[in-house]
Amino acid sequence: MDREPESGGQLLEAESLHTYYGTSHILHGVDFAVAPGETIGLLGRNGMGKTTLLRSLLGLTRPRRGRVRLRGADVTRARPHRSRAPGSPMCPRAAASSPISACAKTW
């Protein structure tokens, strides 16, 4: 996947994401963008929605509202195995004993 992003040069975009587990509203209108070559970190206390955001971006938990774009293509409703980059990383806290570079090299 070496093609250039089509949406304003962004590699990954979240636009007004609202994700729920049942009736529990977890993500409330999350917006952000990641440019090619950019490195980001996601920090927060337990229960703040970090894992839910990652699951929403990877297509494992679908947002009820909002959009996820990968290289400009809307992948919000696409199946994860067809829409995300092969090897898209999700490095939960359990992987903390592994070098962080193992996650970075995957993407």
Image (cartoon, rainbow, N blue to C red):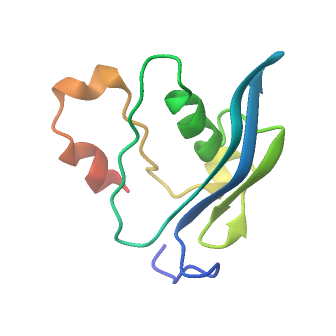
Q: Quadrant of residue 39?
A: bottom left
* In the image, residue 96 above or below residue 42: above
Q: Where is residue 97 in the image (x, y as percent from the top left)?
A: 17, 24
- Residue 95 in view: yes
Residue shown at the point (27%, 55%) measured from the top left: 105
* In the image, residue 98 above or below residue 21: below
Is 39 left, or right, of 99 in this rendering? right
Front-lying residue, 9 or 60: 9
Is 29 left, or right, of 58 in this rendering? right
Front-lying residue, 11 or 59: 11
- Residue 77 in view: no
* In the image, residue 56 above or below residue 70: above
Front-lying residue, 105 or 7: 7
Residue shown at the point (30%, 45%) measured from the top left: 103
Residue shown at the point (59%, 55%) measured from the top left: 84
Of the 4 image quadrants, the one containing the C terminus is bottom left
Q: Position of residue 94 (x, y in %)?
A: 31, 20
